[in-house]
Image: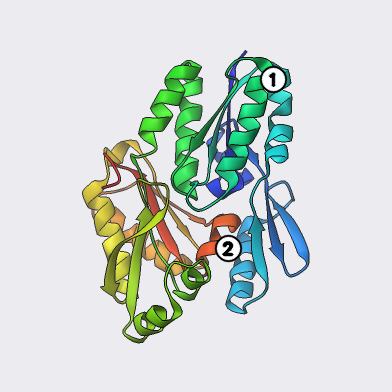
């Protein structure tokens, strides 16, 4: 019997990234619908980089785009092979405050554990999204490789998740409006005076506004400066920057961090599931600190 690590497709753990890491993490696919075409991220063979460039342009054109949460049966089917083989599973999901995927995973967990009369599956609410979830799954996979037992990894996962910092700024407030984050009247005013939101994954598994600044450049600089202030042991970790078709700005952010002594920085497109909710030109930064405060 061994321990298997799972995440959902909102974790930014796309196949090419996992191959580069050489980590055994299984990703439960999620549906992305564009007009009448359904894609399963990332079971379908998608060139994520090229697809992303087209995808965010389609968002700018206001195409009909939405995602679907994983249902309990999807999780059961995903877990089946490992459960039948007698393995234990630790599964990381998108924050329960922004997606019903966590609840679906918990239903699957309860059904499997009750059927077997013991704890086989444990579900971790990542309390964030994108690489914030992905970093937690990677950390758990590292602990499996080090020989930690199931209980110890679960306990560490529940503590470690609040050390993973997820901070971002969006390109256009209208995507937050669609998700009910701000009213259209407030958004119109904010756009008029060029206020930019700074947002982060909160302690209560939601997205919260951490600050407001005037202008895009200041927002990006604030993201970098917060990382410089809050990061723990920068020489021992890789800072991950993800973007929704804003590569030049992401490179500028990386260069600034490098100049300030943070040398290990990687840039990637945002996963399509999370990207569909936050919109084009979003830039986020993910790293490990002492806490999320």
Mark number displayed over residue 115:
1
Q: In the shown orientation, is residue 91 left or right of residue 226? A: right
Front: mark 1 or 2:
1
> Label 1 crowding class (10 Å Cα cut-off): few <14, some 14-19, many 20+?
few
Residue 75 x, y percent position in the rendering: 67, 36
Residue 110 x, y percent position in the rendering: 61, 28
The total number of labels drawn is 2
Up/down of 9 relative to 37, above or below: above
- Residue at horizontal 38 percent and vertical 43 percent from the top: 238
Q: Earlier in the sequence, mark 1 or mark 2?
A: 1
Up/down of 241 relative to 196, above or below: above
- Residue at horizontal 68 percent and vertical 72 percent from the top: 64
For residue 110, say whether it is visible. Answer: yes
Dividing the image into 4 quarters, which one contains the N terminus?
top right
For residue 12, say whether it is visible. Answer: no
Mark number displayed over residue 276:
2
Residue 130 x, y percent position in the rendering: 50, 50
Give how far apart the Cα atoms at labels 1 and 2 are: 36 Å
> Label 2 crowding class (10 Å Cα cut-off): few <14, some 14-19, many 20+?
many
Element at label 2: helix
Spot the residue most to the bottom: 192
Residue 249 x, y percent position in the rendering: 40, 68
Q: In the shown orientation, is residue 240 left or right of residue 229? A: right
- Assess whether mark 2 and mark 1 are in contact (beta carbons under 8 angstroms): no
Q: In the shown orientation, is residue 69 left or right of residue 292? A: right
- Choose between 265 and 191: the one closer to the eye: 191
Mark number displayed over residue 232:
none
Colouring chosen for the image of the structure? rainbow
- Choose between 48 and 264: the one closer to the eye: 48
Q: In the shown orientation, is residue 24 left or right of residue 73? A: left
- Residue at horizontal 65 percent and vertical 41 percent from the top: 28
Spot the residue most to the left: 229
């Amino acid at each position: 019997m061994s321990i298997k690590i799972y995440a959902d497709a909102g974790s930014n753990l796309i196949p090419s990234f996992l191959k580069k890491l050489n980590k055994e993490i299984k990703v439960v696919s999620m549906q992305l619908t564009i007009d009448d075409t359904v894609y399963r991220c990332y079971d379908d063979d998608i060139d994520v980089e090229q697809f992303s460039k087209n995808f965010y342009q389609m968002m700018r054109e206001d195409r009909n785009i939405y995602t679907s949460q994983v249902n309990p049966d999807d999780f059961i089917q995903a877990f089946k092979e490992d459960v039948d083989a007698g393995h234990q599973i630790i599964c990381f999901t998108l924050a329960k405050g922004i997606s019903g995927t966590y609840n679906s995973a918990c239903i699957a967990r309860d059904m499997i554990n009750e059927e077997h009369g013991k704890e086989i599956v444990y579900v971790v609410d990542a309390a964030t999204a994108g690489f914030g979830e992905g970093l937690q799954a990677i950390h758990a996979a590292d602990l499996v490789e080090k020989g930690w037992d199931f209980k110890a990894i679960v306990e560490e996962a529940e503590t470690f998740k609040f050390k993973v910092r997820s901070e971002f700024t969006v390109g256009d407030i209208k995507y937050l409006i669609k998700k009910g984050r701000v009213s259209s009247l407030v958004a119109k005013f904010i756009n008029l005076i060029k206020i930019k939101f700074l947002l982060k994954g909160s302690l209560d598994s939601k997205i919260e506004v951490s600050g407001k600044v005037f202008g895009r450049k200041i927002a990006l600089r604030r993201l970098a400066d917060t990382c410089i202030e809050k990061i723990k042991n920068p020489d021992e970790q890789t800072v991950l920057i993800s973007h929704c078709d804003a590569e030049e700005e992401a490179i500028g952010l990386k260069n600034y961090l490098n100049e300030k002594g943070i040398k290990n920085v990687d840039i990637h497109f945002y996963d399509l599931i999370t990207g569909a909710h936050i919109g084009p030109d979003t830039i986020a930064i993910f790293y490990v600190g002492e806490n999320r405060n």
